[in-house]
Amino acid sequence: MKLGFLGCGKMATALVGGVVQAGVCPADALFVNDCLSVAADTLGQKTGATAVADASEMARSVDALVLCVKPADALTALRGLGDALAGKLVISIVAGLSLSKLEEAAGAAARVVRVMPNTPALIHQGAAAFATGSTATEADAALVSKIFSAVGRAVRVKEPLLDAVTGLSGSGPAYVYLVIEALADGGVMMGLPRDLALQLAAQTVAGAAGMVLQTGLHPATLKDQVTSPGGTTIAGLEELEGAAVRSAFLSAVRAATERSRQLGA
């Protein structure tokens, strides 16, 4: 299996490194191209992938092409490849572009899968969801799952759900960074040194997330386990409920989902 990456930004860098480390593909079966040749050369030197100057040449030589360019450039890039995509699998991580638009641009002879990843893939802790196009096969779906599982977790969904995925896990890291920053500020307000407060806040969020994933328990159950009658935690939770923090997160996911739908219209 030969994989090509069109675009060599942060997400492409994470994916190339991830598939090599996970043994999905050896480095000598990976090919990268970017409109800035220095970006492709740098990624190739870093990972062992082969930098290819001509995008069409790369597309012809690989079995699957991962589209990692900016949304404004994506459809033009696909159309520019022409018949080089015939019989190929195109895996798009471009936000907001529907399968129908991607399939039209790639041509009827190409198969398309659309993926919504997130930035923690850079540290192999990503969350990705993918939807298959009209001619994509089960083998294509399995390959996409394998690639994105190499840098985190990957789940298959129906395409209409990808906007909600964008609102939740695609945008979600920013919400969590805000929480970490706010918790650290609270620690500073109560006398902790800034660096210590930030370390404690970040580790607390990471540990709590790990508890949810590893125990399989509902977050409400885990919350109750650390909430003693008349204790410190319930006092803090009362303040959060009074500030409608839960409602604010619901609204954030809804707003980001609706914006994703607008971008894809």
Image (cartoon, grey):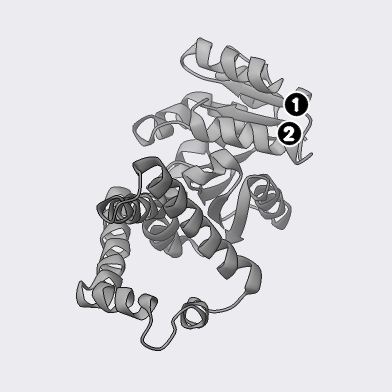
- The residue at the point 52 percent across, 35 percent down is 11
Which three-letter amino acid code belongs to the residue tagged 1?
A: Ala
The quadrant of the image that shows the N terminus is: top right
Tag 2 secondary structure: helix
**Residue 20: numbered disc:** 2
Depth order, front residue of 150/6: 150
Of mark 2 and mark 1, the one earlier in the sequence is: 2
Identified at 51% across, 16% down, the residue is 39
Q: Nearer the viewer, residue 19 or 258?
A: 19
Q: Say whether residue 64 is left or right of residue 228.
A: right
Near-viewer residue (69 or 153):
153
- Residue ID at (38%, 81%): 231
Give whichever of 153, 96 is nearer the camera: 153
Residue 108 picture location, percent across and down = 55, 42
Count of all numbered marks drawn on residues in the image:
2
Residue type at mark 2 is Val
Q: Residues within 10 Å of mark 1 (few under 14, many from 20)?
A: many
As drawn, the label of residue 27 is: 1
Confirm or deny contact between disc 2 and disc 1 (CB under 8 A). yes
